[in-house]
Image (cartoon, rainbow, N blue to C red):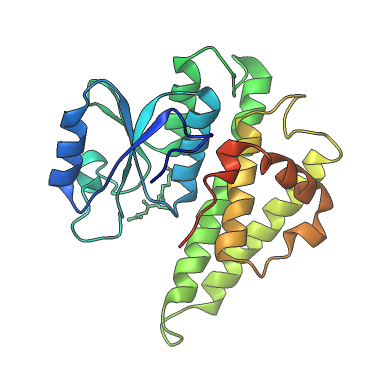
Amino acid sequence: MAQTAACRTMTYVAVTTGRDDIIAALSKQRLKMKLIASPTSPYARKARIVLAEKKIDYDLVLDNPWSEDSGVPKLNPLGKVPVLVLDDESTLFDSRVIAEYLDSVTPNNRLLPTSGRERIRVKRWEALADGVLDAAVAAFLEAKRSKVEQSATSIARQRGKIDRTLAMMAEELGDQAWCSGNAFSLADIALGVMLGYLDFRLSDIAWRETYPNLARLYSELMTRPSFAETVPQG
Ligand SMILES: N[C@@H](CCC(=O)N[C@@H](CS)C(=O)NCC(=O)O)C(=O)O
């Protein structure tokens, strides 16, 4: 993978085929953090965008958590990506914990207000965006099952969560430039990653037409290399 502008601090390590590959990749360079990610995971994309925005040097290790020989369960018993492996080889998950930790590592480009109600407001946006992701992933996986196995009720239930939360987010954004306060923050990252995932997996949801203010913010976010260079493909 070529290094790109947004990821100039990122060194691509390996597409792994299992635990041994991950351990080998980790032992080569002990000092840099490693992010274990899959190219289609929106939660991993959130962590990658945070790393790029914070200009933190790291190695990207690709692993498919759904594959039988995935090394992810050895690093995260939940078997999910992203996992951040720190320089002492301890591990962090999930994406919210990783984002909060990374923001505290360097003082530059703060993505979370340091305390108080403003900080919780950003975390609330993130909880909403991640909740839509959870529902979108569940709806996508259910729809992938055979017609006889899949439950229309379950899909409708997940789609209801998505619809209600998009409406709330659009209302709360109003005509503000950014989700929370008057600067770019983790709230905008979480929202943008979620909207990008809807485009990727549930493209029949016409959120741009229904919510022009979300579309306006999304276009703005896509001008940032951290977003443009991590668009999910597959
Ligand atoms: N809440 C977690 C969700 C992570 C997650 O669900 N990741 C998916 C990829 S999109 C995964 O690894 N799934 C594998 C599995 O559930 O076995 C986070 O924010 O990191």
Task: From the viewer's perspective, tell me whether residue 20 is left or right of residue 212.
Answer: left
Query: In the image as oriented, which residue stretches furthest toward the bottom?
Result: 148
Q: Quadrant of residue 14?
A: top left
Query: In the image as oriented, which residue stretches furthest toward the right?
Result: 175
**Is residue 229 or residue 159 the one in the foreground?**
229
Task: Estimate the x, y position of residue 189 in percent, counting from the top left.
Answer: 60, 37
Q: Quadrant of the image for the C terminus?
A: bottom left
Q: Is residue 110 above or below residue 155?
A: above
**Is residue 132 or residue 185 the one in the foreground?**
185
Task: From the viewer's perspective, tell me whether residue 197 is left or right of residue 58.
Answer: right
The residue at the point 27 percent across, 41 percent down is 76
The residue at the point 44 percent across, 51 percent down is 41
Q: Quadrant of residue 176?
A: top right
Q: How many marks?
A: 0
Task: From the viewer's perspective, tell me whether residue 201 is left or right of residue 64.
Answer: right
Task: Estimate the x, y position of residue 1 in percent, counting from the top left.
Answer: 38, 46
Q: Quadrant of residue 122?
A: top right
One can see residue 128 in this view: no
**Is residue 71 or residue 167 the one in the foreground?**
71
Task: Estimate the x, y position of residue 108 in percent, counting from the top left.
Answer: 56, 14
Task: Estimate the x, y position of residue 156 in percent, counting from the top left.
Answer: 60, 71
Query: In the image as oriented, which residue stretches furthest toward the front?
Result: 2
Task: From the viewer's perspective, tell me whether residue 30 is left or right of residue 39.
Answer: left
One can see residue 58 in this view: yes
Query: In the image as oriented, which residue stretches furthest toward the top?
Result: 107
The residue at the point 22 percent across, 53 percent down is 70
